[in-house]
Amino acid sequence: MRVEQISVFIENQAGRLAEVTQCLADGNISIRALSLADTQDFGILRLIVDDVNHAKVVLGDNNFTVGITEVLAVEVPDRPGGLAAILKIIDSGALNVEYMYAFVDKNRDNNAIIIFRFEDIEAAALCLQQHNVRIVPGAELYAL
């Protein structure tokens, strides 16, 4: 049910993002979703890839600092109010969202997928399931 997400800490310099993506390409690793957040000196690139363990090895071998974090992938109707409905459920459970990012896959019956990092992932999964929200399993997400 949980999804493993790669976090790569990269210097905020021209070309560093290209180096990360080239390492993944050279390792024949496909990116399924990503988010890049920056600070003044460093950025955190968060990736969902098709092979987490191989990506960690490839990036580590190329001297990138890599971490693996568990997140939840939630299927949300891709229509006005779809995200609002999910966030209302999250709010009703008093759950804290640390960050989130999303993508749309038109092959998913007009649904988007939102990647959530929760302060309490167990409580979040339980709350969402109690409200019949579909949590996308990692294997399904990696295989997109």
Image (spheres, rainbow, N blue to C red):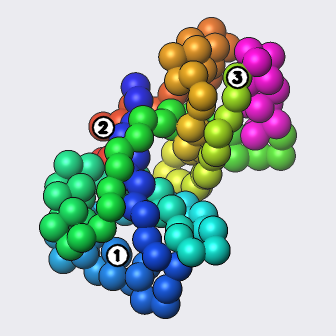
Could you tell which of marks 2 and 3 lies nearer the N-terminus?
A: 3
Residue placed furthest toward the bottom: 14
Element class at badge 3: loop
Identify the residue at image location x=49%, y=51%: 107
In this rendering, the answer to whether 34 lies above or below 86 is below
Amino acid type indicated by mark 1: Thr
Identify the residue at image location x=52%, y=79%: 12
In this orientation, which residue lies closer to the viewer: 12 or 112? 12
Could you tell which of marks 1 and 2 lies nearer the N-terminus?
A: 1
> Marks 1 and 2, how far apart in space?
22 Å
In this rendering, the answer to whether 115 lies above or below 61 is above
Residue segment shown in magenta = 82-94
- Residue 120, quarter of the rendered image: top right
The location of residue 104, given as percent across then percent down, is 59, 55
The location of residue 27, given as percent across then percent down, is 17, 69
Left or right: 81 in relation to 31: right
Identify the residue at image location x=83%, y=46%: 80
From the image, tell me which residue sits under label 1: 21
The location of residue 68, given as percent across then percent down, is 35, 45
From the image, tell me which residue sits under label 2: 139
